[in-house]
Amino acid sequence: MAKVTIYTTPTCVYCKMAKKYFQEHGVEYQEKDVAMDLKAREEMIEKTQQMGVPVIDVDGQIVIGFDQEHLAELLHIQ
């Protein structure tokens, strides 16, 4: 199983869509709320050089935004 981390904010619609997608496909993930967690925010910015969410890290592969096709490819979801 891939190690998945999603950087989110509470009001982000695309973050909610990504988490729902993961739940529907049984993908375990760690969520980091960058609105409340300064360390997570700095970590996300260091990885991506940007402030937009969601940022999804799949085994070190960064996906910016909810790119369902790319996520399906990385997670081997049909």
Image: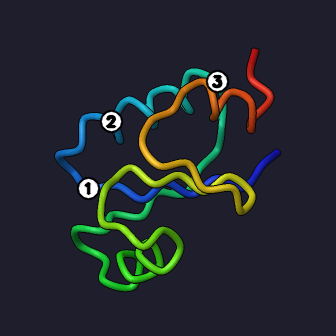
Residue 36, position in %: x, y?
Answer: 23, 73
Residue position marked by numbered label 3 in the rendering: 25
Numbered label attached to residue 14: 2
The tag earlier along the polypeptide, 1 or 3, is 1
User: Please, what secondary structure does the residue beneath circle 3 have?
Assistant: loop
| Residue extending furthest toward the front | 49
Residue under the point 34% across and 53% down: 53
Residue 43, position in %: x, y?
Answer: 47, 79
Quadrant location of the C terminus?
Answer: top right
Residue 19, position in %: x, y?
Answer: 45, 37
User: Please, what secondary structure does the residue beneath circle 1 have?
Assistant: loop
In whole angstroms, how far apart are the C-alphas of marks 3 and 2? 17 Å
User: Please, what secondary structure does the residue beneath circle 2 have?
Assistant: helix
Q: Amino acid at mark 2?
A: Tyr
In whole angstroms, how far apart are the C-alphas of marks 1 and 3? 22 Å
Q: Amino acid at mark 3?
A: His
Residue position marked by numbered label 1 in the rendering: 9
Q: How many marks?
A: 3
Name the side, left or right, on which 12 lies relative to 65.
left
